[in-house]
Image (cartoon, rainbow, N blue to C red):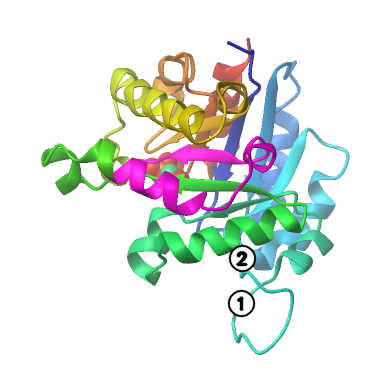
Amino acid sequence: MSVRTKVIAGNWKLNKDVHQTEELLTGLKISLTFDLKGVRVIVCPPFTSLETANRCTKGSVMSLGAQNMYHEDEGAFTGEISPKMLKSVGCEYVILGHSERRQIFGETDELINKKVKKAIASGLVPIVCVGETLDQREKNVTSQIVTTQVRGVLKDISAEQVQKIIVAYEPVWAIGTGRNATPQQAEEVHLLIRTLLAELYTPAAAGDVIIQYGGSVKPDNAAELLWQPNVDGALVGGACLKADSFSAIIKAAVR
Ligand code: PGA
């Protein structure tokens, strides 16, 4: 198995105005002075903070991502943001298909697939989220649900393109609940995703895909989750809003 980089991304969600953005990123720059070998750090503030974040992260170890985008470059799409706009403020990554987008805003695998294709065509790295609800886990349909989602969001994506994608496995029941998946539960689904990718593409392509875990990742559970064989990083919500907790999670990912 290839040695994959660990990728730690902070999903700020609907938090932090411009002033608070500057504060948090300043704190992170002070905290992130340890050797980050083998770890990539991404921060994903809200749209209104991206320009500030771009300025604050320049020359730092942090890369910038957005939390969503539309699959067109411009036009009559009130309220939407394009990949071109994201790139103009320094974004390299974009979270797509987060469960909150799916559940609250009705995003489907089909729409997310359009966004994934557009992101890749635009030179952004999509962080594509999949994961089952509590009800689905209890009904023992986790593998079917995750398989359908992965197939759906990656429709018509080539083997070459898939290696540029980050997949985030985020069990919905673990998001914001303080109840993280156990390392075994996470590894089981990560392995399922990697096996599926090997079937859909090639084992070599599947071996290169970064698969992050997300859902109540905290400093005290990060290491055991991050060091499962098929867990290549974390998508962090609540714990990324404070410099000390986010940097502690990043530290847990350093080899
Ligand atoms: P959480 O959120 O870490 O607060 O559970 C994770 C996410 O939604 O990406």
How far from the left and from the top, in percent, is residue 41?
67, 34
Looking at the picture, does residue 53 appear above or below residue 179?
below
Residue on which the image places disc 2: 69
Quadrant of the frame with the N terminus: top right
Looking at the picture, does residue 61 appear above or below residue 228?
below
Q: Residues within 10 Å of mark 1 (few under 14, many from 20)?
A: some
Residue on which the image places disc 1: 80
Q: Residues within 10 Å of mark 2 (few under 14, many from 20)?
A: many
Determine the image quadrant of residue 222: top left
Residue 204 appears in the rendering: yes
Determine the residue located farthest toward the right in the rendered image: 59
Q: Nearer the viewer, residue 226 or 164?
A: 164
**Which residues fall within the magenta stretch?**
145-170
Determine the residue located farthest toward the left in the rendered image: 139
Label 2 to label 1, Cα distance in Å? 7 Å
Three-letter amino acid code of the residue under disc 1: Glu
Judging from the image, what secondary structure is the residue with disc 2 in?
loop
Judging from the image, what secondary structure is the residue with disc 1 in?
loop
Quadrant of the frame with the C terminus: top right
How far from the left and from the top, in percent, is residue 128?
52, 47
- Identity of the residue drawn at 66% across and 90% down: 76
Q: Are marks 2 and 1 in contact (CB under 8 Å)?
A: yes
Three-letter amino acid code of the residue under disc 2: Met
Q: Is residue 197 left or right of residue 163?
A: left
- Name the quadrant where ligand 1 sits: top left
